Image: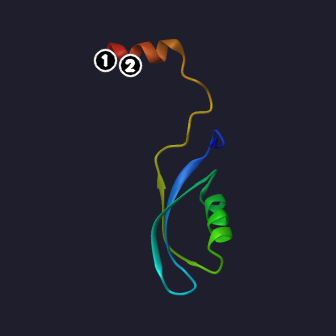
């Protein structure tokens, strides 16, 4: 599965329309609003209890040889 180069992962905790709490739903999105839009497509009429960003966005440019070589020198 390939994701957009500038996407981040967001962890949601929600209450479904039936009242069940679902924790640790991980969804990729360019920003929190994009991830929440995707969440609402999967769980219509849910209530978001918590949202947190996981990790940094993916790099859009590949690492240069010098950057990779410097990691081995440390």
Q: Hey, which residue is sitting farthest front in the picture?
A: 1
Q: Residue at x 64, y 50 (%)?
A: 30
Q: Hey, which residue is sitting farthest bottom in the picture?
A: 18
Residue density around tag 2, few if under 14, some if 14–19, many if 20 or more, within 10 Å: few
Distance (Cα) linking label 1 and label 2: 6 Å
- For the N terminus, the quadrant is top right
Q: Which residue is mark 1?
A: 74
Q: Position of residue 10 (x, y in %)?
A: 52, 57
Callouts 1 and 2 close, C-beta under 8 Å: yes
**67 horizontally vs 34: left or right:** left
- Residue 64 location, quadrant: top right
Q: Position of residue 42 (x, y in %)?
A: 64, 69
**21 horizontally vs 43: left or right:** left
- Residue 72 location, quadrant: top left
Label ID, residue 61: none
Q: Position of residue 71 (x, y in %)?
A: 38, 19
Q: Residue at x 66, y 59 (%)?
A: 34
- Residue 70 location, quadrant: top left
Q: Is residue 18 above or below residue 41?
A: below
Q: Which residue is mark 2?
A: 71
Q: Hey, which residue is sitting farthest left in the picture?
A: 74
Tally the numbered discs.
2
- For the C terminus, the quadrant is top left
Q: Label 1's element? A: loop
Residue density around tag 1, few if under 14, some if 14–19, many if 20 or more, within 10 Å: few
Q: Which residue is at the front of the view, 61 or 40?
A: 40
Q: Label 2's element? A: helix
Q: Which residue is at the front of the view, 42 or 65?
A: 42
Q: Is residue 31 above or below residue 74?
A: below
Q: Residue at x 49, y 55 (%)?
A: 53
Q: Position of residue 6 (x, y in %)?
A: 63, 42
């Amino acid at each position: 599965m390939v994701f957009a180069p500038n996407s981040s992962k967001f962890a949601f905790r929600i209450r479904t329309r039936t009242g069940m709490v679902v924790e640790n739903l991980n969804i990729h999105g360019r920003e929190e609003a994009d991830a929440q839009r995707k969440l609402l497509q999967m769980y219509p009429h849910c209530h978001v209890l918590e949202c947190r960003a996981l990790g940094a966005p993916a790099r859009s440019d590949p690492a240069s040889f010098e950057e990779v070589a410097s990691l081995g020198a440390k």
